[in-house]
Amino acid sequence: MDIHQRIAEITDRIKLAAQTTNRLAVKVTLVAVSKVQPDERIEAALAAGLRVFGENRVQEAQGRWANRRQAYPDLTLHLIGPLQSNKAEDAVALFDVIETVDRPKLVETLAKLAQTGQKLPKLLVQVNTGEEEQKAGVAPRDLPALLQLCAIHELPIEGLMCIPPENEEPAMHFALLAKLAKRHGLSVLSMGMSGDFETAIKFGATHVRVGSALFGERMRAV
């Protein structure tokens, strides 16, 4: 199955999932997870019309996308991996959306960049819904304080993101994230990946991050 067929299949699945909850499929953005994918797959995706991509690492994304910006001015790049504070300036320069704001130090770093006149991308807060020690994201109980800090610094927080634990039913995590977003008046929900994006859509996902279902299995990182 080539990339055109994969896109068509996933688009149909998004439409069907949206219809089951009386939502419009156009309200769900497909973020193609391009991390650790070879150039030929990226070029095929671009040729097929995909323009919204998600990356895990700032440096890898710079190498992949910096020179493609001129050729594809309508690109929208999402950072979906953890962001180190010392990479924040590079991330702000490259990405249109940073989905992984998750701690006070990063909030303060982004605020300082804004104070120097740099335009910040759209921002989402990553919530560690499973409270996994090894995973990035703010614990649900700490979300109000972090959002308050973002408000104090006037950061443009638009929504929330989560990655459910691999060994748990994702639906309850999607439901929790949707509840938290509604409580705090946030409209964007980035949740759902290749194996569970249809469930996420039923719980209100506005962005789904799909990698292997689009590109096939990822190449091993070097």
Image (cartoon, grey):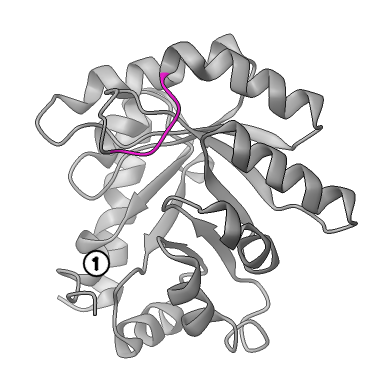
Secondary element at tag 1: helix
Q: Position of residue 139 (x, y in %)?
A: 41, 21
Q: Is residue 104 left or right of residue 137?
A: right
Residue 4 sits above or below residue 184 on the image: below
Q: Which residues are magenta?
A: 135-139
| Image point (28%, 55%), residue name | 10
Q: Position of residue 8 (x, y in %)?
A: 30, 63
Q: Position of residue 209 (x, y in %)?
A: 36, 51
Label the magenta part by its dominant secondary structure.
loop
Tell me which amino acid carries mark 1.
Answer: Arg
Residue 12 seen in the figure? yes
| Image point (70%, 53%), residue name | 121
| Image point (20%, 32%), residue name | 165
Residue 205 sits above or below residue 65 on the image: above
Quadrant assignment, res 162: top left
Residue 49 seen in the figure? no
Mark 1 lies on residue? 6
Give the position of the C terminus as an image quadrant: bottom left
Quadrant assignment, res 166: top left
204 or 181, nearer to the observer: 181
Q: Position of residue 29 (x, y in %)?
A: 48, 49
86 or 127, nearer to the observer: 86
25 or 32, nearer to the observer: 32
Give the position of the N terminus as an image quadrant: bottom left
| Image point (57%, 9%), residue name | 183
Q: Is residue 10 magenta?
A: no
